[in-house]
Amino acid sequence: MFDLKWNHIFYKAGSKEPDPEKPTLVFIHGAGGSSVLWDNQVDQFAGCANTISLDLPAHGDSLGEPEKTLSGYADVVDGFIDALKLPNPVPCGLSMGGAIAQIMLAEYPAKYRAGVLISTGARLKVHPMVLETVKKDYKSFVLLLKDFAAYKNTSYEKIKPIFDAAELENPDTAVNDFEACNDFDIEADQPDQKHLADITAPVLVITAMEDSLTPPKYGDFLIENIPNSTLVRIEGAGHMVPAEKPEETNSAIAEFLNNLFK
């Protein structure tokens, strides 16, 4: 794994120079998170894909200001991909990152040949109590998150790096993210915005059976409304499924890519 920087964006890559013949998995983290979420993925696809995980602006080791909308983050990631000239980009996002990936796939159907959506939904409404806790006492929120973001039987050592990184995040950035998630709605029937039906590329949807934040029904809705989509359910994992069940997650993504990019 290589730690790299472009402009004010910090990112990790499986190699310094991407193979132009392979797809490039672009991993996008969730609200108040960082690229640490994807440390079990970045080095695991050498045979079939280039890999990059980035810290969104004002997250992790990236500088800058947080975007006020998920569309703004989608523009940042899209510009990042263009600047690095990443070949055959495949956005892969979890939760808020999955919403960002949906926007990218809907806005630029000719550019993105595939996408991976993990533990996410077409709407990401945030409970008012959660927003209030994040605003008033961010450290308490992170402590609570440890109890409901992962399956109860998951070894804490698997997810500890994610929460250690979350504790260092700026609370204002986390509040911004959750408010942006609360406003996200790609299923709404409004003529001035993109919808799930605008996503024409093949999409892999991964849901975790013990996810209490974005339950499996969220994935079911995506499958029913994205024309060319495939669903994989992972048992014994919660919202942080890439860290909780990395082997199963990586296997599902690798099979999806191998079927598309032969």
Image (tube, rainbow, N blue to C red):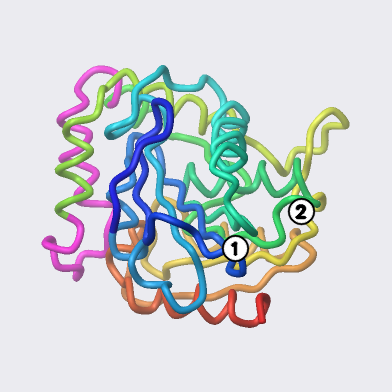
**Residue identifier under label 1:** 20
Along the line of sight, the residue nearer the viewer: 64 or 100? 64
Q: Residue at x 17, y 31 (%)?
A: 168
Q: Position of residue 219 (x, y in %)?
A: 58, 62
Q: Earlier in the sequence, mark 1 or mark 2?
A: 1
Under circle 2, the secondary element is loop
Q: Is residue 64 above or below residue 258?
A: above
- Mark toward the viewer: 1 or 2: 1
Count the marks. Answer: 2
Q: Amino acid at mark 2?
A: Ile
Residue lying farthest front? 17
Q: Mark 1 Cα within 10 Å, few/some/many (few <14, many 20+)?
A: few
Membership of 56 in magenta stretch? no
Residue 66 in which image quadrant: top left
> Is 55 placed left or right of 221 in the picture?
left
The stretch of residues the image draws in magenta is: 134-159
Q: Amino acid at mark 1?
A: Pro
Q: Position of residue 89 (x, y in %)?
A: 61, 55
Residue lying farthest right? 191
Q: Is residue 22 above or below residue 97?
A: below
Compute the Cα span from label 1 to label 2: 24 Å
Mark identifier at residue 199: 2
Q: Position of residue 252 (x, y in %)?
A: 49, 77
Q: Quadrant of the N terminus?
A: bottom left
Membership of 158 in magenta stretch? yes
Majority secondary structure of the magenta segment?
Answer: helix
Residue 6 in which image quadrant: top left
Along the line of sight, the residue nearer the viewer: 3 or 32? 3
Q: Residue at x 27, y 52 (%)?
A: 148
Q: Is residue 171 above or below residue 51?
A: above
Q: Mark 2 Cα within 10 Å, few/some/many (few <14, many 20+)?
A: many
Under circle 1, the secondary element is loop
